[in-house]
Amino acid sequence: MPWRSIDLADFFQSVLEWVIVVFLSLFGGGVRSCLRPDEHRKTVAMAMVSIFAGVITYKIARAGGCSQDLSAGLAGLAGLAGDELCRSILKLGSAIRDDPLGFLDRMRRGK
């Protein structure tokens, strides 16, 4: 039979676990926006980056054998740092694109 029985207690435990992880990640992103209120940030984009960073960190921590509490704490920290890390990567990319030292031009010429 292609259907398998689902234990509702395990299902709701899993759903509750993911709701907590998403909340902690979003809360970490909210803390970041409160720490820098002078910057006008796009709230939806910040929330999406925070949740993504938190969920990925949670999955990596759980796969690495960390406890559920430690993994949830790391998810909150990743949510806090996720938006800032994304902004830093974008700044680094634009700095490389602008090439102020002419490094890429020298590499293209083979010198």
Image: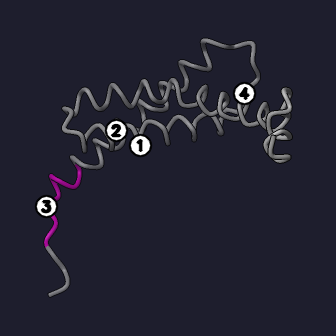
Across and down, in percent, residue 43 comes to 66, 32
Q: Residue at x 57, y 41 (%)?
A: 48
Query: Mark 1 vs mark 4: which is more N-terminal?
Result: 4
**Front of the two marks 1 and 4:** 1
Query: Would you place residue 88 above or below residue 5 in this image?
Result: above
Dots 2, 1 in contact, CB < 8 A: yes
Label 2 – label 4 distance at C-alpha: 25 Å
**Front of the two marks 3 and 1:** 1
- In reply to whether residue 18 is colored magenta, the answer given is no
Look at mark 3 in the image and give the residue it sits on.
7
Label 3 – label 1 distance at C-alpha: 26 Å
Identify the main secondary structure in magenta. helix
- In reply to whether residue 6 is colored magenta, the answer given is yes
Query: Mark 4 vs mark 3: which is more N-terminal?
Result: 3
Label 2 – label 1 distance at C-alpha: 5 Å
Q: Secondary structure at mark 2?
A: helix
Which amino acid does the dot numbered 1 rest on?
A: Ile
Query: How many residues crowd mark 3 within 10 Å: few (<14), some (14–19), many (20+)?
Result: few
Q: Residue at x 19, y 85 (%)?
A: 2
Label 1 – label 4 distance at C-alpha: 23 Å
Which amino acid does the dot numbered 4 rest on?
A: Arg
Look at mark 1 in the image and give the residue it sits on.
56
Residue 58 has which mark?
2
Which amino acid does the dot numbered 3 rest on?
A: Asp
